[in-house]
């Protein structure tokens, strides 16, 4: 017994010594790098250049503004808002065009099935199930990504992204994470799977894993349509019509800031518990501002990012369309499996301010967040295939006719913001971390946070009699 205790103590001591050695190595490495930069700066300052002493250093003047503690963050927020505005407004038209095109093709395919006397169930599975799901995913995902990623790559090519990392480095370091996580988090606004892939730029495996596990807390382009639609319903209706879009946009921005706050909080908790360790220093040499290279921007944003991420989403969404159609069209007794499942989940859903159909929509929307709202509309209208209503007002009337309140809409948005990542992102976490364990943790952890938050809000609101 004593021998086993001595052996365990020896192993514990050896592990502690190893961790202390690694920490000292990191500190020594950071000290050496910092001293090199300080010495280089000192040498550069002692060099006298008579030829250029009157020349204005525009890089420095820009950095004084963009990295200032007073103007740096407001400029970041305004630029992010501008990118969102361009993405949302710019994607409306191509998204509508793609939707019309795909559903026009669906009509021709349906006519072909009828002419060929194909079985109705085969048409349902292939066209109303798989094809319609893919049509939704592509028409909703492709335009925002095709706008957001080039905008993001343009800022990267200009040299602005390192300034964002510089501004946010202090916050992420306090959270026990890495300054570069600000860049991977920003990439998550376009697509969380792409944000997880971008975590490769973080050298430390521990901090890279923290960045991967928390990337889901910023909404991707698949969740923005849901957040915008519901914020228009809940917030836009509280003000006059001319200010409804502005009010809805402001509320979505607040939700984004809340997601960033949750990212920092969860990063801090992980760094103090499961992924404990000393934050590595982030010695960042701000590069000069550069003239954008159009060819590089187009290739990197559209080929490396947009097409790559869309391909993964399509691969996951296709079988999901089959499952959704089967659940909505196979009946047990007088009700479909979808209805039975929603009824089973109703008590749990009610405790967090939602309903069984909403929970089923999120579960079935696991392959792609874009299909959550169509599934919910399909469920409320008791149809056998995914649908979209003609207007936000029609959606509002449908939802409130099915027992919604302002609390339901708010909780729906919060759950959409915080719940488990989509199938593409989970798959990417598994591939990038090399472990199914972390992929499962990255699925369960945000869902648990969302459930706890919604439970507290719902029960507090009901206790106070506000709903």
Image (spheres, rainbow, N blue to C red):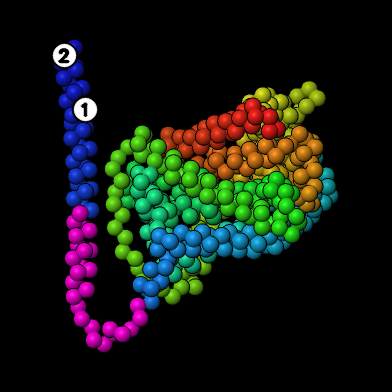
* Residue at the (70%, 63%) spot, across then down: 93
Would residue 436 be counted in the magenta stretch? no
Question: Can residue 295 be spotted in the picture?
Answer: yes
Quarter of the rendering containing residue 15? top left
Question: Quick one: quadrant of the N terminus?
Answer: top left
- In depth, the one of 117 and 9 nearer the eye is 9
Question: Which residue is disc 1 drawn over?
Answer: 12
* Residue at the (70%, 32%) spot, across then down: 467
Please state the horizontal and vertical placement of residue 75, each as a whole percent of the image.
49, 63
* Residue at the (51%, 59%) spot, across then down: 77
Please state the horizontal and vertical placement of residue 130, each as a whole percent of the image.
68, 44
Please state the horizontal and vertical placement of residue 320, each as a whole percent of the image.
63, 40
Question: Can residue 112 be spotted in the picture?
Answer: no
- In depth, the one of 438 and 463 nearer the eye is 463
Question: Which residue is disc 2 drawn over?
Answer: 2
CA gap, disc 1 to disc 2?
A: 15 Å
Characterize the local packing of mark 1: few (<14), some (14-19) or many (20 or more) Cα atoms within 10 angstroms: few
Extent of the magenta region: 31-57
Pointer 1 with pointer 2, Cβ within 8 A = no
Q: Earlier in the sequence, mark 1 or mark 2?
A: 2
Whether 400 is drawn above or below 60: the answer is above
Q: For the view shown, which residue lies furthest in the bottom direction?
A: 51
* Residue at the (15%, 16%) spot, across then down: 3
């Amino acid at each position: 017994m004593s021998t086993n205790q001595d052996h365990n103590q020896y192993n514990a001591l050896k592990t502690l010594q190893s961790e202390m050695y690694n920490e000292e190595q990191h500190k020594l490495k950071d000290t050496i790098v910092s001293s090199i930069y300080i010495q280089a700066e000192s040498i550069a300052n002692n060099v006298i250049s008579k030829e250029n002493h009157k020349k204005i250093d525009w890089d420095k003047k820009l950095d004084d503004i963009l990295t200032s503690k007073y103007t740096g963050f407001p400029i970041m927020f305004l630029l992010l808002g501008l990118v969102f505005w361009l993405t949302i407004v710019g994607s409306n038209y191509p998204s509508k065009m793609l939707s019309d095109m795909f559903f026009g093709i669906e009509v021709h395919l349906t006519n072909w099935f009828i002419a060929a006397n194909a079985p109705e169930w085969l048409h349902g599975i292939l066209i109303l199930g798989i094809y319609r799901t893919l049509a939704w995913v592509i028409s909703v995902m492709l335009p925002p990504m095709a706008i957001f990623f080039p905008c993001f790559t343009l800022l990267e090519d200009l040299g602005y992204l390192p300034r964002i990392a510089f501004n946010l480095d202090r916050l992420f370091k306090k959270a026990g994470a890495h300054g570069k996580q600000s860049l991977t988090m920003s990439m998550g606004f376009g697509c969380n799977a792409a944000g997880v892939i971008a975590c490769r730029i973080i050298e430390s495996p521990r901090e890279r894993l923290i960045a991967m596990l928390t990337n889901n807390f910023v909404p991707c382009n698949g969740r923005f349509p849901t957040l915008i639609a519901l914020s228009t319903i809940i917030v836009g209706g509280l003000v006059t019509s001319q200010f409804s879009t502005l009010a809805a946009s402001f509320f979505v921005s607040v939700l984004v800031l809340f997601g960033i706050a949750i990212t920092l909080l969860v990063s801090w908790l992980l760094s103090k518990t499961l992924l404990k360790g000393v934050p590595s220093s982030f010695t960042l040499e701000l590069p000069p501002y550069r003239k954008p290279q159009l060819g590089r921007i187009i290739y990197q944003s559209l080929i490396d990012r947009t097409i790559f991420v869309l391909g993964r989403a399509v691969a996951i969404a296709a079988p999901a369309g089959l499952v959704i159609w089967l659940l909505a069209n196979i009946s047990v007794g007088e009700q479909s499996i979808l209805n039975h499942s929603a009824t089973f989940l109703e008590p749990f859903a009610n405790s967090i301010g939602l309903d069984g159909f909403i929970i089923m929509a999120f579960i079935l929307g696991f392959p792609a967040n874009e299909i959550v709202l169509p599934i919910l509309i399909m469920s409320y209208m008791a149809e056998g295939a995914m649908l979209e209503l003609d207007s936000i007002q029609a959606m509002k009337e449908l939802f409130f006719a099915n027992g919604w309140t302002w609390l339901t809409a708010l909780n729906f948005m919060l759950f959409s913001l915080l719940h488990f990542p989509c199938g593409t992102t989970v798959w990417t976490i598994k591939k990038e971390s090399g472990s199914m364990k972390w992929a499962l943790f990255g699925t369960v952890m945000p869902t648990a946070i969302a459930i706890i938050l919604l439970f507290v809000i719902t029960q507090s609101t009901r206790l106070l009699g506000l709903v």
